[in-house]
Image: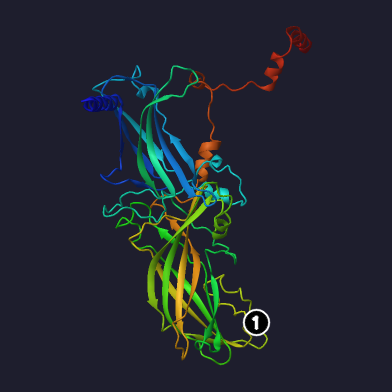
């Protein structure tokens, strides 16, 4: 009996609490039922906030903000537990005029109060957002670019599946429109009391421009743009020569802005090409191996940290922080294509005796020939080139390459090529490369590009800056223009009366 009384009393308190809280509804103009609206740089986020109450409620302010937040959580290896960080990198506030509020500030039962809002997705963040220590001068430029929504589950625009952007649970980047109803406290220094607070998620995929190609160092574990391998006749037998495989960073993959693609995943016509250059340096007069198959994969790497990044993240910095557990990296491999290249031809080259090219003279351009191998000393070599198309699959959701204070997303194109040595009876050998590749996002059609110069004609300049204008009050400006007195009249009016009389007498 006592238990039933307690249960009934708890339900009554819960129902009273629900009734006493104001109800806030956020309606977006581009809202579709069951979907999270998506925006890009320069888009207008507009809507209406509707507030209703079930009893008269006194309030002081309604705050409408557009917020962007980043959250990370890293498992420590040196000691049990986790460490993490939370960062609000964007906060835009909607101004509300005093005339919009009811007078007095009381929400009455039976009435509906509406407050419109408008936000514009910015291109950059304020400089004070990235105020931590840095070891690279370009980091602040990257950290103040707007990052995309990351790791926030939501339905795709085709209503068939949840967005899979290959993000671990340890990091999140989210955007939302937040509405908070506040009441000032009685104490002068106390914080305002929150009567109700509601948020509505939106998806942001900002416009991202192409960056210069990366300068990859030899100890970088994420990338490998050149590789050499011995081509052997068979197991425990001599080698035919040495194979060099190299590739340059391809042009970026351009993602479509949200809502511009036909199937809702942004990957209908997204593609680029990568060129794999091969060189075979024979020991004697051996022929080059026959090529087999090219496999392409996309390595999606997400970096996250409990401390702000002072430099661009890399695999080496993750290894150095492994013991402290303040940083982490998550990589997912997405298969792209498989292509037979057995018919790719080799081209024979002969160099004059004593001439030798630099081994690094190969990856600066897709049209240059690979440099010689480390042990090359002959005069004859062979080259070949294989063009590999790159098309993103539709089953995944991709975001542009970005670097923020706590989270970063980079991509690498893994290219593996197999070959067959003459008379070889061993497993088919292969060589693999990992080439950096950027994912960018183009602007909406008709949107002005960054750095657009506005042309102003000379007539517009003359009308704005060189046309005569009056700054006098209207009553004075309408008076007829009076010619100024000549110099003699001004001079005579400034003389003393007795002096002018004296002058006049002298003239007579």
Q: Position of residue 276 (x, y in %)?
A: 48, 74
Residue 113 vertical placement versus 308 (above, below): above
Residue 168 can be seen, yes or no = yes
Question: Can you tell which quarter of the image residue 98 is in?
Answer: top left
Q: Position of residue 236 (x, y in %)?
A: 53, 87
Crowding around mark 1 (Cα neighbors within 10 Å: few <14, some 14 to 19, many 20+) is: some
Which of the colour schemes (rainbow, by chain, secondary structure, one colour) is used? rainbow
Q: Residue furthest top?
A: 498
* Mark 1 secondary-structure assignment: loop
Residue 264 vertical placement versus 17 (above, below): below
**Which quadrant of the figure contains the C terminus?**
top right
Q: Position of residue 444 (x, y in %)?
A: 39, 52
Residue 122 can be seen, yes or no = no
The one of 488 and 111 positioned closer to us in this rendering:
111
Q: Position of residue 233 (x, y in %)?
A: 51, 89
Numbered-mark total: 1
Residue 353 vertical placement versus 186 (above, below): below
The one of 140 and 80 positioned closer to us in this rendering:
80
**Which quadrant of the figure contains the N terminus?**
top left
Instruction: Indicate left or right for 19 with 351 as reference.
Output: left
Residue beneath the point at 47% across and 40% down: 90
Residue beneath the point at 48% across and 67% down: 250
The one of 184 and 467 positioned closer to us in this rendering:
184
Residue beneath the point at 45% across and 79% down: 418
Q: Residue furthest front?
A: 1
The one of 454 and 418 positioned closer to us in this rendering:
418
Q: Which residue is mark 1?
A: 356
């Amino acid at each position: 009996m006592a238990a039933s009384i307690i249960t009934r009393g708890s339900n009554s308190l819960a129902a009273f609490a629900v009734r006493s809280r104001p109800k806030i509804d956020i309606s977006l103009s581009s809202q579709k039922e069951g979907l999270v609206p998506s925006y890009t740089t320069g888009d207008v986020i507009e809507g209406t906030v509707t507030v209703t109450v079930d009893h008269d409620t006194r309030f002081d302010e309604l705050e409408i903000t557009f917020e962007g937040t980043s959250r990370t959580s890293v498992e420590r290896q040196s000691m049990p537990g986790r460490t993490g960080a939370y960062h609000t990198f964007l906060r835009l506030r909607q101004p509300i005029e005093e005339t919009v509020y009811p007078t007095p500030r009381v929400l009455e039962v039976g009435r509906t109060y509406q407050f419109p809002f408008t936000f514009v997705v910015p291109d950059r963040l304020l400089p004070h957002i990235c105020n931590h220590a840095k070891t690279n001068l370009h980091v602040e430029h990257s950290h103040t670019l707007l990052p995309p929504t990351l790791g926030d589950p939501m339905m795709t625009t085709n209503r068939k599946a949840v967005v899979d952007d290959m993000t671990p649970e340890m990091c999140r980047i989210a955007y939302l429109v937040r509405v908070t109803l506040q009441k000032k406290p009685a104490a002068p220094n106390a914080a305002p009391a929150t009567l109700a607070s509601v948020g509505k998620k939106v998806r942001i995929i900002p416009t991202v421009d192409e960056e210069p190609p990366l300068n990859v160092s030899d100890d970088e574990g994420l990338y490998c743009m050149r590789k050499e391998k011995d081509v052997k006749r068979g197991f425990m037998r001599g080698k035919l020569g040495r194979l060099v495989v190299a590739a340059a960073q391809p042009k970026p993959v351009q993602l479509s802005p949200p809502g511009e693609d036909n199937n809702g995943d942004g990957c209908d016509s997204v593609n680029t090409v990568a060129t794999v250059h091969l060189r075979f340096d024979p020991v004697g007069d051996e022929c080059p191996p026959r090529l087999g198959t090219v496999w392409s994969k996309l390595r999606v790497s997400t970096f996250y940290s409990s401390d702000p990044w002072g430099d661009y993240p890399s695999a080496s910095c993750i290894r150095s922080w492994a013991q402290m557990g303040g940083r982490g990296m998550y990589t997912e491999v997405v298969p792209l294509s498989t292509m037979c290249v057995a018919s790719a031809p080799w081209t024979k080259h002969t160099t004059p005796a004593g001439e030798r090219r630099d081994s690094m003279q190969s990856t600066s351009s897709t049209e240059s020939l690979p440099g010689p191998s480390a042990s090359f000393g002959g005069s004859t070599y062979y080259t070949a080139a294989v063009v590999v198309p790159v098309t993103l699959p539709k089953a995944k959701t991709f975001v542009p390459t970005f670097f923020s204070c706590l989270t970063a997303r980079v991509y690498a194109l893994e290219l593996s090529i197999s070959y067959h040595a003459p008379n070889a009876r061993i497993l088919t050998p292969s060589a693999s490369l990992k080439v950096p590749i950027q994912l960018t996002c183009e602007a909406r059609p008709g949107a002005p590009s960054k750095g657009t110069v506005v042309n102003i004609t000379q007539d517009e300049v003359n009308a704005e800056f060189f046309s005569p204008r009056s700054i006098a009050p209207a009553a004075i400006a309408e008076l007829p223009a009076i010619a100024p007195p000549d110099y003699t009249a001004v001079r005579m009016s400034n003389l003393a009366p007795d002096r002018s009389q004296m002058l006049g007498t002298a003239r007579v």
